[in-house]
């Protein structure tokens, strides 16, 4: 899925579908640096394919020249990586440095004693922590302790809109509140324009609506309680309110007709937006790259607008809060040798240097470094990237995608019930009951 990875903003990314679809079908040993490092070399596995692989490899190459240790790299395709890592962890043979997405996956490693607690290390190396986005540490933190080094780029969920469609419907600006959003729906429908594009068949696209509504209405603790295993957490009044509001939007014909059969993998949801069939779309910031690659002159002609998800009147949530991918994460394998752990920590201190930041920016990403916006000035996409920087760096809380945060069992139940919720096949109360049944599983 493209939301898990990075899509280049360059024309060369037109055929790309993210890192999961790129790279070799199996592992590739691409170790580098002076000497092999022998048994003391720290091993590091990560995803293959552009744009991420060469940027990550470059960071390793520069570190291996410092004399502070040697890192040996092996790259894998997305699904192969997940399977290989699971097997390696089970066999006690995982890499010294574990690349991942944080959240639920990291929590399972912590509970199994497979990764080191880095809390004290970050306290002793405050300069490393302080230069990164505060919100990036959310998915790296389990039970108040930090178990991973935040890395790479940030990808928040944002509201994209077609300025031309707005003009046709006589709507001046994207909604600032949920009430305004609901008021705009009939105006677009009256002009034969769907208010929102939605790839409902993919299910996780629907989930983004709930993530932000839960947060805007009740704050991050509403989902946090479910994540932490609180009994009947999904029955929280704020949760029921959010579930009800999204069904109100469905009933008001807020989404493109037939949304349940639209797929995200085909980029059909973005196409509906830039072709003027839909006025708005709630999606990850990676959508910009898709639209730039496939939408002709839509962006160049200034027809794309973007904004944050609206506030909810009377809601307890901070409207600056964001959801999506707050970063990517590197953990240290608990069974690695002391020398390998020392090398990993030395590497962490060098990560996201100027060269690496520039690489991510050129790929269309915003590095999770405070002040990285100063490096965006020469990008042809600087306006959008600065917007993403502001959304991400100013977020008081940056929530992780729910299906990444939850266990695989709970995540699948969640996606099944989200599809039914949007298709009006379950009530908000039934949704909550079904989800309460898998809390902690």
Image: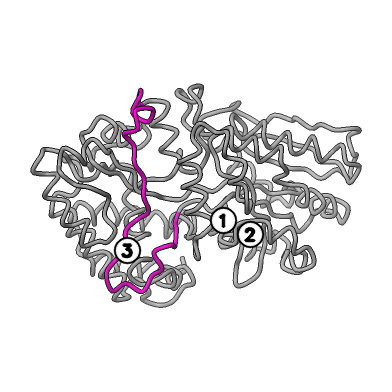
Which residue is the site of mark 1?
105
**Position of 95 relative to 316 (above/below):** above
Which residue is the site of mark 2?
109
**Position of 195 relative to 364 (above/below):** below
Secondary structure under tag 2 reads helix
Between 173 and 435, the one nearer to me in the picture = 173
Q: For the point 35% across and 24% down, which residue is it?
A: 297
Residue 115 vs residue 182: left or right? right
Q: Quadrant of residue 122?
A: bottom right
Q: For the point 88% across and 45% down, which residue is it?
A: 69
Residue 51 place in picture, x, y as percent: 59, 31
**Position of 75 relative to 284 (above/below):** above
Which residue is the site of mark 3?
311
Q: For the point 28% across and 74% down, which residue is it?
A: 314
In the image, residue 229 lies in the stretch drawn in magenta: no
Tell me whether the residue at label 2 lies in contact with that at label 1, contact meaning CB atoms closer than 8 angstroms: yes
Residue 9 vs residue 211: left or right? right
Q: Which residues are magenta?
A: 295-323
Q: CA distance from mark 2 to mark 1?
A: 7 Å
Q: CA distance from mark 2 to mark 3?
A: 35 Å
Residue 64 vs residue 315: left or right? right
Upstream in sequence: badge 2 or badge 3: 2
Residue 319 place in picture, x, y as percent: 39, 64
**Position of 384 relative to 248 (above/below):** above
Q: CA distance from mark 1 to mark 3?
A: 30 Å
């Amino acid at each position: 899925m493209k939301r898990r990875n990075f899509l280049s903003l360059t024309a060369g990314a037109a055929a790309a579908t993210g890192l999961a679809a790129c790279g070799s079908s199996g592992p590739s040993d691409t170790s580098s640096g002076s000497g092999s490092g022998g048994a003391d070399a720290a091993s590091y596995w990560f995803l293959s394919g552009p744009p991420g692989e060469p940027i990550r490899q470059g960071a390793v190459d520069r570190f291996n020249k410092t004399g502070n240790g040697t890192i040996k790299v092996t790259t894998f395709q997305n699904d192969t990586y997940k399977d290989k890592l699971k097997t390696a962890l089970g066999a006690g043979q995982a890499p010294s440095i574990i690349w991942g997405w944080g959240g639920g996956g990291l929590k399972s490693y912590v509970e199994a004693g497979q990764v080191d607690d880095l809390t004290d290390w970050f306290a002793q190396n405050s300069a490393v922590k302080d230069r990164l986005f505060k919100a990036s540490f959310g998915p790296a933190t389990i039970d108040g302790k930090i178990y991973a080094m935040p890395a790479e780029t940030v990808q928040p969920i944002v509201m994209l809109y077609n300025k031309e469609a707005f003009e046709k419907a006589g709507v001046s600006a994207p909604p600032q509140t949920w009430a305004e959003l609901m008021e705009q729906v009939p105006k677009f429908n009256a002009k034969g324009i769907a208010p929102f594009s939605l790839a409902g068949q993919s299910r996780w696209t629907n989930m983004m609506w709930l993530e932000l509504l839960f947060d805007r209405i009740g704050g991050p603790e509403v989902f946090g309680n479910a994540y932490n295993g609180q009994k009947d957490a999904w029955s929280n009044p704020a949760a029921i309110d959010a579930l009800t509001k999204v069904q109100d939007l469905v009933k008001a014909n807020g989404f493109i007709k037939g949304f349940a059969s639209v797929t995200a993998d085909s980029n059909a949801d973005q196409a509906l937006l830039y072709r003027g069939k839909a006025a708005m779309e709630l999606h990850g910031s990676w959508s910009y790259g898709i639209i730039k690659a496939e939408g002709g002159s839509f962006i160049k002609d200034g027809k794309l607008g973007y904004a944050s998800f609206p506030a909810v009147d009377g809601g307890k949530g901070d409207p600056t809060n964001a959801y999506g991918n707050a970063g990517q994460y590197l953990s240290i394998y608990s069974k690695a040798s002391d020398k390998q752990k020392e090398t990993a920590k030395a590497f962490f201190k060098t990560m996201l240097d100027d060269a690496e930041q520039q690489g991510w920016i050129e790929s269309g990403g915003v590095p999770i470094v405070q002040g990285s916006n100063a490096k965006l000035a020469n990008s042809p996409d600087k306006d959008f990237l600065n917007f993403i920087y502001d959304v991400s760096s100013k977020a008081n809380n940056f929530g992780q995608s729910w299906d990444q945060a939850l266990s695989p069992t709970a995540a699948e139940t969640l996606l099944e019930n989200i599809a039914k919720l949007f298709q009006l096949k379950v009530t908000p109360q039934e949704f909550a009951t079904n989800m309460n049944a898998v809390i902690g599983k």
